[in-house]
Image: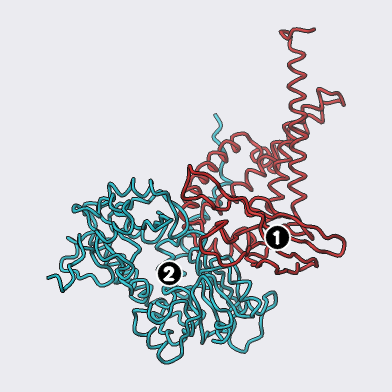
Amino acid sequence: MHTPRLSFLLPVLALLPLFAACKDEAKDKTPDFLSIGEFSVNRKAAYTEVRDGAGRALALVPRGAPHPAGFSPAMVVEAPVRRVVAYRPFETGILKALGEEESIVGVTYPRDKWAVDYMRRGFDEGRIAFVGDFSRVDYERIKAQHPDLVLTWDPSIVPMMDSLGIPTVVTSTPVATCLNTHIRFVEFIAPFFGKEAQAQDYYRKLRAALESIRARTRGMPQPKAMWGDIFEKRVLVEPGNAWVSELIGLAQSDYLFDDVYGTSCIEISTERFLYSGKDADIYFTYRTPDRGATSKAALARTNPLLARVRPLGPEGRTYAPLPHYAQSADRLDEILTEIAAILHPQAYPGHELRFFVELPDEDPAPAKDR
Amino acid sequence: MSLPLRFWRTLGSIRATVALCFLLTLDLALGYVSLRANLGVFVPLGDVGLFDWLRTYGVYNPAATAWFFGLLALLAALAANTFACTTERVLQILATGSWKRDWVVRFAPHIMHYAVLLILTGYVCSYLFSTSLPGRGLRAGESLQLPGGGVVTFLGFAPEAYRGERLAAFDGYVLHANARLRLDAAAESREAALDFNRPVRFGGYGLYLNDFGPRKAKGGMRRGDFIRITLRRDPSAPVYLAGLALFAVGLGLYLLGRGMKKANHPCTPHA
């Protein structure tokens, strides 16, 4: 009987383990190529090519260096960037983590919406300008700030920015970013500012936080959590592929919208929301206390349907983010730990909430009624 | 048997085919899992080209892409196996045949095999030689100059929105954007509608819709009409289209052969 002669396949199979070896080698030095979810950084001889969340390729060149061929002026960024307009508070937090908060010259939230000192100070010093609400930014105001770069989640502004000759990076992606992309996004931003070393320090801090969460929550009973809200006309949740969902899974918990896939803050039907809500132990609302999330009763008043979710009753827990939560990407390790502490209070005895608040059943009575 | 002949026979053996198919199944099963977990690594493959992708995303994400390297190697081996196997058989038929109808139809499966090889070659060439310009944004009224001449102007949308109560939350959401484009070149000027899975061909380029806004026909966060498109020039498209045509010819011959066999079968009732 003949045996199959597969010897010509052996070289193919033998090659596979070699690829595994590449990874360890890459850890020892800054790799020439980084892919971070949809984002990438490709260091070439004369310039660095970055690919943003919309799949657009931009060239990073040293200041004063000739622009590479094949890139329009608005697709070339002179690094290090000195003046940046940032749409999302997440990006301002990342810039703070890199020590680049002084580079921020424009944002889409007015001064009174900022809860972090360095941003308020930037407004007070006249360095930072409010360039208009994200839904109707003032392009002339952006231009007047002379930014080297605009970081935006809104791809619809790119054509206008191109016509103004202002390089723009789209920081949003077609689907929600996973946990790995979320904690490594700093590695995408760092080359614009020449802060790769600071990015590595920040990333290591986050890795350590995640490893600690994994270790502390191992073997714990799994609470069921949901993250989203019912607004006037829309029901929005974090999908199963979002970083919060993955974090909840990593922290030995059950995310109830795990089967939902798509963009961050995705719209689902009210029925789907309520279906999961009847089983949930913990509920994270999008609303901050200054937007009505002061108590379970107050949330229920905003939409009576919300009262049907279990965590709004006496047997569940409901948490609202504080205003500085979304603006504190520089303290992301603390945020990750806090979410784990909310899910497993027994693993974090004595933990004091700094980014979230647990909602009481009722609002406290006004002082004059006491 | 000489060494080259032995190698040729081994290359085209049915045992190798079965083994390769088994390994391909295994590899694609790994790929299924890896693709779901690392979609972002594979999305740029269509934009940056195969070699650049292998050099960057491929090599720097070995845990996610090893299966793809394996797939390329296995597909190359399967192509060689198919070529050797089918050529061996074609030579045998040629040596014994005459130009009669029942003799010609014996080539049918082999024509289909060659067609599959041509399709595979076309796809490889497409990844190797196509050029792609991703993420070009246009607002209503704006134009884009194609590298080889020709101007694309985005005129606006003729959207088809979802209207219904079954999915009330999605009422008013755009199902088909139908972005209206005006395409101007020296030789032609016309209008076309661009949508997902409905690209527009113009000036040697394929125009593909990546994104558009607003997504809701009325209300929602309206920030002006815009589209984001990818321009793609693929000189190898005729190769795999030729492969598809050849496959159709082979299939036609095969069906003809089946019909002849059925007609000549002793149990077939004749009119």
Question: Could you tell me how far apart the alpha carbons at marks 1 and 2 are, in whole angstroms?
Answer: 31 Å
SS for callout 2: helix
Q: Where in the figure is residue A265, as x and y percent of width and height?
A: 43, 60
Q: Where in the figure is residue B192, as x and y percent of width and height?
A: 74, 55
Query: Which residue of the protein is positioned furthest toward the bottom in this rendering?
Result: A125
Which residue is labeled 2 in the image? A184
Quadrant (top left/top right/bottom left/bottom right) for the C terminus of chain A = bottom left
Rate crowding at label 1 as few (under 14), some (14 to 19) or many (20 or more) other CA atoms within 10 Å.
some
* Residue at 70% from the left image edge and 43% from the top image edge: B117
- How many marks on residues? 2
Kind of residue at disc 2: Arg
* Residue at 82% from the left image edge and 31% from the top image edge: B94
Q: In the image, B92: left or right of A359?
A: right
Quadrant (top left/top right/bottom left/bottom right) for the N terminus of chain A = top right
Kind of residue at disc 1: Arg
Q: Where in the figure is residue B144, as x and y percent of width and height?
A: 72, 68
Q: In the image, A304: left or right of A166?
A: left
Query: Which residue of the protein is positioned furthest toward the front in this rendering?
Result: A369
User: Chain B's colour?
Assistant: red
Which residue is labeled 1 in the image? B232
Q: Nearer the viewer, residue A241 or A250?
A: A241
- B2, above or below A360, in the image: above
User: Chain A's colour?
Assistant: cyan
Q: In the image, B174: left or right of A321?
A: right
- B237, above or below B110, in the image: below
Rate crowding at label 2 as few (under 14), some (14 to 19) or many (20 or more) other CA atoms within 10 Å.
many
Q: Nearer the viewer, residue B249 or A154?
A: A154
